[in-house]
Amino acid sequence: MSHIAFIGLGNMGAPMALNLCKANYALRVFDLSAVALQTLADAGATVCDSAQQAVQDADYVITMLPASRHVEEVYLGAQGILPSIADHALIIDCSTIAPQTAQKVAQAANARGLSMLDAPVSGGTAGAQAGTLTFMLGGAVAELERARPVLSAMGKTIFHAGAVGAGQTAKICNNMLLGILMVGTAEALNLGVVNGLDPQVLSEIMKSSSGSNWALHHYNPYPGVMPSVPASRHYTGGFGVDLMRKDLGLAAESALANNAAIPLGELTRHLYTLHSQAGAGSLDFSSIIQRFNTALL
Amino acid sequence: MSHIAFIGLGNMGAPMALNLCKANYALRVFDLSAVALQTLADAGATVCDSAQQAVQDADYVITMLPASRHVEEVYLGAQGILPSIADHALIIDCSTIAPQTAQKVAQAANARGLSMLDAPVSGGTAGAQAGTLTFMLGGAVAELERARPVLSAMGKTIFHAGAVGAGQTAKICNNMLLGILMVGTAEALNLGVVNGLDPQVLSEIMKSSSGSNWALHHYNPYPGVMPSVPASRHYTGGFGVDLMRKDLGLAAESALANNAAIPLGELTRHLYTLHSQAGAGSLDFSSIIQRFNTALL
Amino acid sequence: MSHIAFIGLGNMGAPMALNLCKANYALRVFDLSAVALQTLADAGATVCDSAQQAVQDADYVITMLPASRHVEEVYLGAQGILPSIADHALIIDCSTIAPQTAQKVAQAANARGLSMLDAPVSGGTAGAQAGTLTFMLGGAVAELERARPVLSAMGKTIFHAGAVGAGQTAKICNNMLLGILMVGTAEALNLGVVNGLDPQVLSEIMKSSSGSNWALHHYNPYPGVMPSVPASRHYTGGFGVDLMRKDLGLAAESALANNAAIPLGELTRHLYTLHSQAGAGSLDFSSIIQRFNTALL
Amino acid sequence: MSHIAFIGLGNMGAPMALNLCKANYALRVFDLSAVALQTLADAGATVCDSAQQAVQDADYVITMLPASRHVEEVYLGAQGILPSIADHALIIDCSTIAPQTAQKVAQAANARGLSMLDAPVSGGTAGAQAGTLTFMLGGAVAELERARPVLSAMGKTIFHAGAVGAGQTAKICNNMLLGILMVGTAEALNLGVVNGLDPQVLSEIMKSSSGSNWALHHYNPYPGVMPSVPASRHYTGGFGVDLMRKDLGLAAESALANNAAIPLGELTRHLYTLHSQAGAGSLDFSSIIQRFNTALL
């Protein structure tokens, strides 16, 4: 089996790496958290002292990091791994970052004769654990095919969005739309409830009508309508308000750089910013409905 | 078979009435348009000289009118039909109007010993023609069951939203959400395109991800992505910008009356107002993407 | 001196009526609050048992009531005063209400041979006490001149906005703009502060530049910048959040009725609605800056 | 008299440089436009072949450039002037750019032993010609005093906003607020006009009331209300829509970098973006009222 270096073992990275272990890949891992490293060691991975050490002789280098600046630092920083990566290796960055950063790192990799794919995911921690993530890839088709067996061990759907950076752009567009859907769904449910409608009945009606969207089907923000979503456990778990703000910030940067107007996207970002400043930063992002109905606080 | 009076034979009313003819109901119809009356006459309906005449001896009185003021006028005006309706008849108003107006007419009907359902529809002219409309009903369960056979000749799904007026509230909430979905989808597609993505590829990705919504699945606003939608025929046909504005106005009135905050709903309404003022009032509502990308004008 | 009936002795009405007493008008007053009535009695006014009794033989009938429905009830309700007003009297409604309600009451007055002016005020309780209010009048010029001596005892500036209802429209437009100025000023000050600027220095700069506006000159929302404003006493006193919401709601109704787009006005209304729902309804409206900077809570 | 190098002779830079000539400073100037250079030559300035040549032996180096990237290029680029500036010179950048860029250039200058002030201006081309600009300065007090005589030849008010970069931040905050004032004023005037008010009368009322702001006093957006503003000459001249968008973009970047919420600021930016995309990019920014009232197109 191929050798894989995996750097970044957070809430998403750790279960992704574990799925690679289960698929019998030889894993060399690095993270700053000793706990995360131990989990992977227990699963058979080789723990390394540094990112540079992890990438030695790897056929694939996979990174899953919090933000643009971490990706830039890990690849291009003073202790960066780019010089240590083997000539035949394929780089796959699964972080959600700015497309411009993805392109910058890819150019530096190309200058060293290496190829890189940007491969952000959707599906959340549940999808990471179940191995059912969706990958949105930016890069050349040939590299995508080289990556497919490895990605298939972590997810079930692979989209080719376009050239390097296009995976990040697709992720950003999707998550901005998700934020809009969630706030819009919260507004519509609240408007119905203040007019005397049952939130469950209204949800069923809109699911079957032209208001149908992912939030109504999989992530209803009204407590009690769906049993197993964050709204029914006091908005714990799930996808945090501050993570949604980060993704909406990437959309805002992209719109600014391209003179694109995203009025609903920006208003959504500001509503989440006000929500976070009211103390809800670590709640699930469906808790935005609390802004509209304080009885749900 | 039951006798049905049908008043209001516009783009929605006419095909609905035709489906009742096909189901062998005895129809007495009235409208101000001679053309519309002739179409129904050709299908076997009895044309009447006035709304009052049409409702004589009817078992069901169905109205499909443009706005609150027309419904109020037809039932409660100087030439209103309420006094002429038979004691055993059931009133079904399929117009999309303010819940308060529905409640006002229903109270007047009750005072005369009559029952009324508010039964706005979704599905558009295509659904009206195919007999596949969705009905959102407000009123008592017993009346809903009395109405079911008649409604089933015009649609395939019947939701009971709650007491009188609840059908209108559900329709208003749904259509506000639809407006938000459409603008949000237009923003996301445009943001992707200005960053170099193919709108078809991005649409496929978001359909399979958490940005999934009715507009992406059935009504893509980007020209050429779906062959049979208004976006692919210069935004002709479909659901007009000014009709969307009307529905968003009903949501605004309802939010105002209840002190509910609908920030995305209102911003959507204003974007459609600006779009209409730029001359697009009669285009399909998916044309809002032209505001974001003037290359699509 | 002329006889004046004054109905509505709240935070605004009581000091206005007291100024009329000081100007030696013969006042007959009515309110539901015994405390308010006693205050006026101490100042020499005649306390009445009902509004109908107060207007007997009055040369001027002045009302200062909370909202449209109160004005409609006091003039046109079952116990309404319209039938009891003397034929030679002039009606002056100083309440802030919907222009349509002003027009409806004026028409009913006209039908009885009476004239009415809508005369909403700006200047707040401080202006009411000092007799420095600004009046925005709707009605005929001749009636305005008849009202001038009376109004001059309560305010120092009288604008003639146009026909009946125009006073209300002018007030609504002004207060919507005031809400926008306040939120915009709060955003700008907060943006400066998070970037390290001193709020006092930034306020001085913007007061002398093109960002200059009433809030910066008379009502700075940042605590400590101006010593005698609500921001420097924990946002107590002043013009309440819920009163601003009411005025923004009147603007929204007017825009809805006329298909006018007021995107900033509506977003401002929603921000105040969210602020009120977070518990700030009775704070001064400059407290909106707390939404942007929770350190100011 | 001191020697001054002046780089950037556009609509703002040229009249500023001319005022320095009038004040008898010895000017060495550079720009890419031969026409601009000739104008300054006629006024007695020494025309140089490059920016590097212009700064030789100068006591003050003044730059007035379109955007951040130009400032970075002129000072720090391959042909940058920083190495050529005399050790005793003071650098004054009057461009409106990102505070971060100002700080970056200032740090590079400091590393060379030079001091720099960021000194963006308000007052427009009219203020530049009349020598009545307002300067918003970032930097140390001692440098500000060194700059004062030179700045006084070009403007009449000098504010010290704080440390390096603070001048830019103050300008950004002010101009964001200006954009909000203008759109808010346009909404309020249009709402009054559609309700039958005269825009001149409504403007007078709001100028004397709590809606008072710079736009109403100096730059009314409604045609015909003020004789000498862009609104009364088909929105030509003045401060362009695309320049307002640039400044609102700087505010957006700053808010993004600091997690500040600027909901009205961002909605204003998007309205200007949509306005520009409708073809109005080179009109005066008060033309935004055309979006609300197409009769004004």
Image: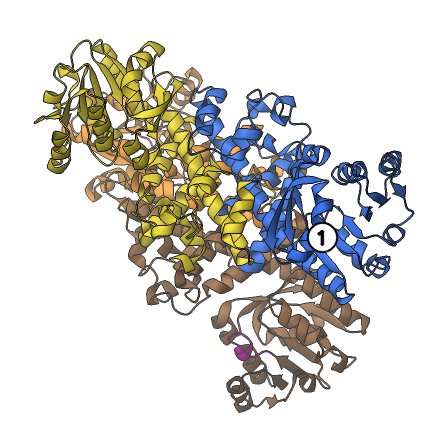
Chain colours: A blue, B yellow, C orange, D brown
Q: Secondary structure at mark 1?
A: helix
Residue A223, percent from left and from top? 58, 22
Count the marks: how many? 1
Q: Nearer the viewer, residue A248 or C295?
A: A248
Q: Which residues are magenta?
A: D8-15
Chain letter for mark 1: A
> From the viewer's perspective, is residue A13 above or below residue C66?
below
| Direction front: furthest residue | A1
Quadrant showing the C terminus of chain C:
top right
Residue A269, percent from left and from top? 58, 43
Q: Nearer the viewer, residue B211 or A60?
A: A60
Q: Nearer the viewer, residue A84 or A155?
A: A155
Residue C10, percent from left and from top? 42, 25
The amino acid pointed to by label 1 is Arg
Residue B278 located left or right of residue D245: left
The residue carrying pointer 1 sits among few (fewer than 14), some (14 to 19) or many (20 or more) residues within 10 Å by Cα, namely few
Q: Which residue is mark 1?
A: A146
> From the viewer's perspective, is residue C96 above or below residue C203?
above
Q: Is residue D146 visible?
A: yes
Q: Main secondary structure of the magenta part?
A: loop
Q: Is residue C66 visible?
A: no
- Which quadrant would residue D210 be assigned to in this image? top left
Residue drawn where x is 90% and y is 52% of the image:
A53
Q: Determine if the magenta segment contains residue D188.
A: no
Residue C105 located left or right of residue D39: left
| Direction left: furthest residue | B49
Quadrant showing the N terminus of chain C:
top left
